[in-house]
Amino acid sequence: MANGYETARNDAMASETCCSEDACSHIDVGFWFKGFLDGMAVLDEPQRERLFRSCARTCLAQGTMAMYGELFEQARGDLDEFFRLVRDIPGVSARIERPGHAWCLIFETCSCPLHGAGYVDDPALCGCSRQSVTLAMHELWPDERFTVHLVQTVLRGDPVCELAIDRLT
């Protein structure tokens, strides 16, 4: 009797088009993310932070960092002005909690493309968004130190995604 692997392999080999793009377009890769999140759940906090930092760099490189860079230039490096300009981005708002020291960045919806594509609904992935904002802040203001905390996330059932940003220096 064939095991599950042998059965799947035999079925794939029997199909002449198994490796064609059209034949595989029906495969839902969402299953992979479940395994990824299960594996991530057993990592300790520093390991998760390193993993999310890597994911955040990749996500920022898709255009978000360039957008933040343009706002930085328009604001001439002024943090409060930067967050005032963020308010012009559709679906995004910001609050200046303490001028020059603390801000909140608010997204009306989850902006994660993995969630948008229907692959992930796990709030654990919000750690990537936190890292994304952290990396962007450090990239734009390399002589400053910041902390970023998740206050609310859509994936936890909150109405918005809100990140609190504090300047340490």
Image (cartoon, rainbow, N blue to C red):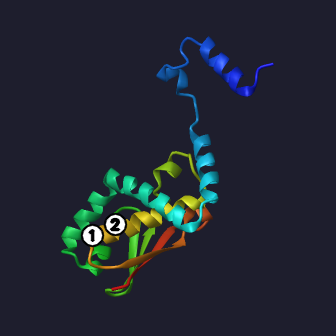
Name the residue rendered at 35%, 57% in the picture: 60
Q: Return the residue at label 2.
A: 136
Residue 109 vs residue 30: left or right? left
Q: Amino acid at mark 1?
A: Leu
- The quadrant of the picture occupied by the C terminus is bottom left
- The quadrant of the picture occupied by the N terminus is top right
Name the residue rendered at 47%, 23% in the picture: 21
Look at the picture and state if 8 lies above or below 122: above
Q: Does residue 117 appear anywhere in the picture?
A: yes
Q: Which mark is residue 140?
A: 1
Q: Amino acid at mark 2?
A: Ala
Is disc 2 in contact with disc 1, using a CB cutoff of under 8 Å?
Answer: yes
How many marks are shown on the rendered structure?
2
Give the crowd class for mark 1: few <14, some 14-19, many >=20 residues within 10 Å.
Answer: some
Q: Does residue 108 appear anywhere in the picture?
A: no
Residue 118 vs residue 142: left or right? right
Residue 9 location (% of width, % of height): 64, 21
Q: Tag 1's secondary structure? A: helix
> Alpha-carbon distance for marks 2 and 1?
6 Å
Look at the picture and state if 122 lies above or below 138: above
Residue 108 location (% of width, % of height): 47, 64
Residue 74 location (% of width, % of height): 19, 70
Look at the picture and state if 86 lies above or below 41: below
Q: Which mark is residue 85?
A: none
Name the residue rendered at 25%, 67% in the picture: 71
Residue 144 location (% of width, % of height): 30, 79
Q: Tag 2's secondary structure? A: helix
Where, by quadrant of the figure, is residue 2 drawn? top right
Q: Residue furthest right?
A: 1
Where, by quadrant of the figure, is residue 155 drawn? bottom right
Name the residue rendered at 44%, 65% in the picture: 131
